[in-house]
Image (spheres, rainbow, N blue to C red):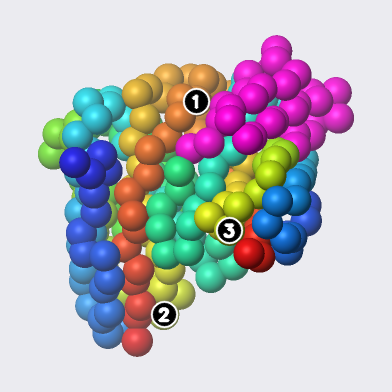
Amino acid sequence: SQQGEEDPQALSIQEGENATMNCSYKTSINNLQWYRQNSGRGLVHLILIRSNEREKHSGRLRVTLDTSKKSSSLLITASRAADTASYFCATDGGNTGKLIFGQGTTLQVKP
Amino acid sequence: DTAVSQTPKYLVTQMGNDKSIKCEQNLGHDTMYWYKQDSKKFLKIMFSYNNKELIINETVPNRFSPKSPDKAHLNLHINSLELGDSAVYFCASSQRSLGAYQETQYFGPGTRLLVL
């Protein structure tokens, strides 16, 4: 089965609220990445966290990584309607030389 | 300027036809990829080239043949198209993909293929 599993599959919140998405993976990793995909568009890289890091921030984004639990979370604070998109985690698949994507969380932010 | 571009954006064709999708990146990256995204948004790697050399070849029917004329271009040719080939195909590039370490990947806008 695929490396990354995301939870929840869909999330609907009001503008201004925080959104949290979780990702679990199976094998050891060197890094984990989060990507955003707007409807009908390609994926855009958001943030990369290395296996020796526990938390990383980028603007309104906060990513945590727990390698003991093989899980990561993406927090978007003060969400905006423009944050409406699908969010994917991707891992390097434990020395396979390729990125393996989760199935994504579809986030809807209502104005 | 578009970093990773793909043509065409939409492709509607009959079963049994042969079609090609082209990809170009102007980021100076060494590695390029083809991904397939199905209707459930599941994104799966198909191929990867590093400096024109095939380095990843997933379990993909041999009707799919990638070609990299130079490190800035990676094309995908599909023979004898089938209904199940309908999907969105994404090209991506990264600075390097050597061994386990994966750099950030930059994606094209996708090619929406519909086989009738």
Mark 2 crowd level (few <14, some 14–19, many ≥20, 10 Å Cα): some
The crowd level at tag 3 (other Cα within 10 Å; few <14, some 14-19, many 20+) is: some
Horizontal and vertical percent for residue B57? 41, 42
Q: Helix or strand or loop: what does disc 2 sit on?
A: helix
Q: Is residue A50 left or right of residue A46?
A: right
Q: Which mark is residue B102?
A: 1
* Secondary structure under the numbered disc 1 in the rendered image: loop
Quadrant where the C terminus of chain B sits is: bottom left
Circles 3 and 1, Cβ within 8 Å, touching? The answer is no
The image quarter containing residue A92 is top right
The front one of A44 and B31 is A44
Tell me whether marks 2 and 3 sit on the same chain: no
Q: Which residue carries the number 3 mark?
A: A81
Identified at 42% across, 20% down, the residue is B98
The stretch of residues the image draws in magenta is A45-73
Check if mark 2 and mark 1 are on a common chain.
yes
Residue type at the position of mark 2: Leu
**Which of the 4 image quarters holds residue B48?**
top left
Q: Is residue A72 magenta?
A: yes
The answer to whether residue B104 is above or below residue B3 is: above
Q: Could you tell me how far apart the alpha carbons at marks 2 and 1 are, in whole angstroms?
A: 33 Å
Q: Secondary structure at mark 3?
A: helix
x and y percentages locating residue B10 in the rendered image: 27, 71
Q: Identify the residue at horizontal 63%, vertical 30% (top origin).
A: A32
Residue behind mark 2: B83
